[in-house]
Image: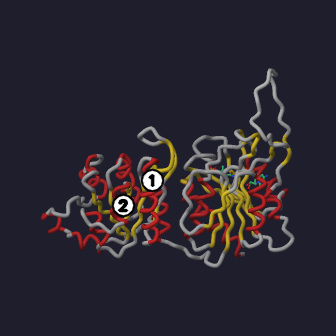
C-alpha cells in the first residue's frame, strides 16, 4: 500500500554498524511511495557507500556541506525546505548530542537546523552509551524540542553487549513514520489503560517465578494509542523498554501489585487492554531469607492463585471500561481464546498463538486473531508496532459502536 505516497523524506544516516540496515529502510520507504533523499555523515560512509543508497533511493546522495557540485544541484537550504520529514536512522550518540545543542557542523545537522519539518531520530549505540546520563539528557532535550524518538530496541548488540540501544528494524521505523504522517487523532478524549510485560512472583529475596514477556506488544499498543491522541496509562511489569512519548507509566512487579494498579486506573478509563502475561499463581509464603539447599533431592513450593486482573476489571459494577484481553496459547488457540472471552466476560480478545518462536513472546513480530461476540478478524504477522496500530483502530471502532 502506498501509505507514504508523495512524502518527501530526508534520511540522515550517521556512523554506526546499524547503517547497514539503512539500504533496506530506504527500500521499504520507497516501496510505500516515499521520495527519499539521503544525507550521509562522514562516519556513516565508513559503514555504507553513497552508491548503494543512490541505487536504492534513485536519488543522488549528499554528504558534504562544502561540495560545490551537490550545492549547485540541490543546496542544503533547498534540501532542508524540500523535506516533509527528516528521519535520522541510525542516530549515533554523537549526532544526538550535536542536535541537542543546535550545532550545525556538517550537512546533516545544518539541514536539521535549517528545516521546519518534523525530525525523528532512531538512536543506535552501545547500551552503556545509551544509558549514559549525557545521552539521556540530550534525548530529553530533543523530546522537549518536539523531536520524535523512535526506539531504541533492546537486545543483543554488535559489540557483544545486551541491552537498550539497538536501532529499531526498518519495518518498525516505517510503521512509526506512517503513524507520523497519518496521525489519526480520533482517540482524543479517550482514556486507555494497558497492562504489559510479565509479573514476578517472589520465592525468596533473590528468586522469583516469571515468564518470557518482554513488554514489546503492550508498549507498542501504548505508543499507538498515544499517537492517535488517547490519554494512556501503561501498567508495566519489569521490562527493559523506554516509555513511549506522552504515556503515563506505572511500574509494578507482582500480579497483586498489578491488580491494585489496574483496578485504580480502570475505573477512570474508557478502554482497558490486558496484554500483560500475569502469573496465574504465586508462592503462598515468600521466604524472608534466601532458601538454603538441603540434602533432599526435591523441594516443594506451595502456590496460591493470583487474582484474575482482567476478569476483575470486566466485572466492575460501575465505571466498567470496554475490556480487551489477550489469550496466549500453544494449542487449541481459537477455542481457548473464545472460552476466555466468555469466562472473563470480556468485550474482545486477541488470540495469540505463542507456539512459534518468530512471534509472540519476546519477538519483534506478532500475529493475532481478534474475537468479539459476533465477529472475528485475523491480523496477520507483522511488526508489533504495525499490529498495534491496527488493533487500537479496531478496538476504538468497536468501543464507539
Ligand atoms: O510482551 P511480549 O514479549 O511482547 O509478548 C506479548 C504477549 C505474548 C505476552 C502478549 O501478546 C499476550 O499474549 N499477552 C497475554 C499473555 C497471557 O498471560 O495470556 P493468558 O491467556 O494467560 O491470559 C489471558 C488474559 O487474562 C490476558 O489478557 C492476561 O493479561 C489476563 N490475566 C491473566 C492472569 C491473571 N491472573 N490476570 C489477568 O488479568
Mark 2 surroundings within 10 Å by alpha-carbon count, few (fewer than 14), some (14 through 19), many (20 or more): many
Which disc is residue 261 wearing? none
**Tell me, what colour scheme is on the image?**
secondary structure
- The structure residue drawn at horizontal position 64% and vertical position 79%, both measured from the top left corner, is 189
Where is 32 relative to 278, above or below?
below
Tell which residue pokes out farthest to the bottom in this image.
189
Tell which residue pokes out farthest to the front in this image.
289
Q: Which quarter of the figure has residue 78?
A: bottom left
Q: Nearer the viewer, residue 347 or 119?
A: 119
- The structure residue drawn at horizontal position 27% and vertical position 53%, both measured from the top left corner, is 55
Q: Nearer the viewer, mark 2 or mark 1?
A: 1
Label 2: which residue?
A: 97
Q: Is residue 390 left or right of residue 280?
A: left
Query: Quick one: quadrant of the C terminus?
Result: bottom right
Q: Which quarter of the figure has residue 203?
A: top right
SS class, disc 2: helix
Which disc is residue 132 wearing? 1
Q: Earlier in the sequence, mark 2 or mark 1?
A: 2
Q: Is mark 1 within 8 Å of ligand 1?
A: no
- The location of residue 157, given as percent across then percent down, is 45, 42
Q: Is residue 248 visible?
A: yes
- The structure residue drawn at horizontal position 17% and vertical position 67%, both measured from the top left corner, is 71
Q: Is residue 374 visible?
A: no
- The structure residue drawn at horizontal position 42% and vertical position 56%, both measured from the top left corner, is 123
Q: Is residue 153 left or right of residue 45?
A: right
- The location of residue 92, given as percent across then percent down, is 37, 54
The Cα atoms of the two marked residues, 2 and 1, are separated by 12 Å
Q: Is residue 93 left or right of residue 268?
A: left
Q: Nearer the viewer, residue 288 or 32?
A: 288
Amino acid at each position: 500500500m502506498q501509505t507514504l505516497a508523495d512524502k518527501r523524506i530526508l534520511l540522515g544516516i550517521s556512523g554506526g554498524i546499524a547503517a547497514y540496515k539503512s539500504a533496506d529502510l530506504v527500500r521499504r520507504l520507497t516501496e510505500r511511495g516515499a521520495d527519499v533523499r539521503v544525507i550521509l555523515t562522514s562516519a556513516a560512509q565508513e559503514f555504507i557507500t553513497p552508491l548503494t543508497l543512490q541505487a536504492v533511493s534513485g536519488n543522488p546522495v549528499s554528504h558534504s556541506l562544502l561540495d560545490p557540485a551537490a550545492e549547485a544541484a540541490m543546496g542544503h537550504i533547498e534540501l532542508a525546505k524540500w523535506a516533509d520529514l527528516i528521519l535520522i536512522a541510525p542516530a549515533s550518540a554523537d549526532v544526538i548530542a550535536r542536535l541537542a545543542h543546535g550545532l550545525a557542523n556538517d550537512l546533516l545537522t545544518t539541514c536539521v537546523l535549517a528545516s521546519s519539518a518534523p525530525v525523528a531520530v532512531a538512536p543506535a549505540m552501545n547500551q552503556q552509551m545509551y544509558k549514559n546520563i549525557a545521552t539521556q539528557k540530550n534525548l530529553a532535550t530533543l523530546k522537549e524540542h518536539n523531536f520524535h524518538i523512535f526506539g531504541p530496541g533492546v537486545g543483543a548488540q554488535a559489540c557483544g553487549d545486551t541491552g537498550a540501544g539497538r536501532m529499531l528494524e526498518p519495518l518498525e521505523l516505517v510503521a512509526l513514520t506512517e503513524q507520523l504522517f497519518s496521525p489519526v487523532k480520533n482517540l482524543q478524549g479517550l482514556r486507555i489503560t494497558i497492562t504489559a510485560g510479565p509479573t514476578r512472583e517472589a520465592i525468596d529475596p533473590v528468586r522469583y517465578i516469571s515468564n518470557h514477556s518482554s513488554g514489546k506488544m503492550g508498549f507498542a499498543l501504548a505508543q499507538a494509542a498515544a499517537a492517535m491522541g488517547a490519554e494512556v496509562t501503561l501498567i508495566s511489569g519489569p521490562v527493559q523498554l523506554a516509555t513511549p512519548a506522552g504515556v503515563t507509566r506505572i511500574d509494578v512487579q507482582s500480579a497483586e501489585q498489578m491488580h491494585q494498579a489496574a483496578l485504580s486506573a480502570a475505573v477512570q478509563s474508557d478502554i482497558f487492554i490486558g496484554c500483560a502475561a500475569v502469573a496465574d499463581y504465586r508462592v503462598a509464603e515468600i521466604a524472608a531469607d534466601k532458601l538454603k539447599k538441603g540434602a533432599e533431592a526435591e523441594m516443594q513450593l506451595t502456590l496460591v492463585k493470583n487474582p484474575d486482573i482482567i476478569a476483575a476489571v470486566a466485572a466492575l459494577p460501575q465505571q466498567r471500561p470496554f475490556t480487551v484481553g489477550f489469550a496466549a496459547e500453544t494449542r487449541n488457540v481459537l477455542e481457548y481464546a473464545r472460552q476466555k472471552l466468555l469466562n472473563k466476560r470480556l468485550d474482545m480478545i486477541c488470540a495469540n498463538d505463542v507456539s512459534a518462536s518468530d512471534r509472540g513472546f519476546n519477538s519483534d513480530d506478532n500475529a493475532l486473531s481478534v474475537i468479539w461476540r459476533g465477529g472475528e478478524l485475523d491480523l496477520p504477522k507483522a511488526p508489533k508496532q504495525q499490529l498495534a496500530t491496527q488493533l487500537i483502530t479496531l478496538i476504538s471502532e468497536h468501543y464507539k459502536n
